[in-house]
Amino acid sequence: MKKYQLSDHCRKLISPQGENITLYQICALADFGSVCKGQLGGWVEGPDCLSQQGSAWLEEQVEVFGGAQVSGDAQILGLSRLTGRLHVTDSAQVKDCQIDGPADISGEARLFDSRIIACMGFTADPDQALTISGNAHIRRSLLAHQVCVCDHAYIDFGFLQHRACVSGYAIIQGNDNCNVWLCDNTCVSDHARIIAGQDTDSIPVLRGHVRVADYAVVEGNCVLSGSVTLLDYANLHGGPVVLCDNVTVRGHGRIAGNVRLENATELRDNACIETWDNETVLLRDSRILTGNQHITRASPFLPFER
């Protein structure tokens, strides 16, 4: 038994590829979920856009076309537009989003007020699609390419692109002034947190093969690039902090202020590097800081030349 039909109401638009497309408004044929018989819904290019099974539904201003499909109990709400090889299923909810596939959105994922521009070719697997699944929660963010967000990950004011992955209970928290940028092969997992500051330059940027896991925290003006790993309870507070080329911070290692680390530097245990005011610290050679070592600008290291 069909749950909806295409009505006689239609609208025309031009696709991102410049094609003329006709969309038809859907009308419910029966009561299901929170939908009542006779209720008008969103706009689709054809019957393949919305499954006749389950309680999946499109609110009145939603547009679905260009190969996009909605099934299961998924709800597409507000001023959303879905296009491309895109599949939204299970109990996923999308509100006020523009999404261009190829992408898969499933589970109990929640997307609000976000823009997704998916495309393939940024991984060794040419068929890997952008994926949002589990209980992932995304707000006011931009996701591009072959990004993966899963489990209980939370993202607000994030900019994720290429092959970036956020999983576990990780939190990506930007604000009205600053987004959090995750690029390339960056992976943030477990209970890690990446937090933007309130100043206009307090933008965390993670790019390359960066891994932030366990309970590690990155906050403020921090740039991590190359092979950088933060584990355990590592804590970075930018002013600015720059880590690049095989840097590892683990244990309760802490970095704060204007600090730059390069070339296989590692902090373990309770080791700490911090500066105040306009002071700077630069460590370029391969070093391992352990125990309770505490490095400040007063230590015999050359400052970072800005």
Image (cartoon, grey):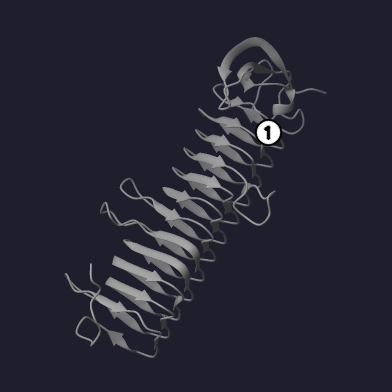
Residue at 23% x, 86% y: name it: 299
Front residue of 50 and 144: 144
Q: In the picture shown, does residue 19 fall above or below 305?
A: above
Residue furthest to the right in view is 1
Q: Residue at x 67, y 50 (%)?
A: 128
Outermost residue on the bottom side: it is 291
| 214 lies left or right of 36 | left
Against 12, is 167 above or below? below
Identified by mark 1, the residue type is: Val
In the rendering, at what x and y percent does residue 252 appear?
41, 80
Note whether 122 is above or below 19 in the view shown: below
Quadrant in which the C terminus appears = bottom left
Q: Nearer the viewer, residue 171 or 116?
A: 116
Label 1 secondary element: strand
Residue 270 percent across, percent down from the top left: 38, 85
Residue found at the far top of this picture: 8
**Residue, x 19% and y 84% (percent of image)?**
298
Query: Quadrant of residue 305 in the image?
Result: bottom left
Place of residue 118 in the rendered image (x, y in percent of width and height, measured from the top left): 58, 42
Residue at 34 percent of width and 89 percent of height: 292
Reading the image, the residue beneath label 1 is 70
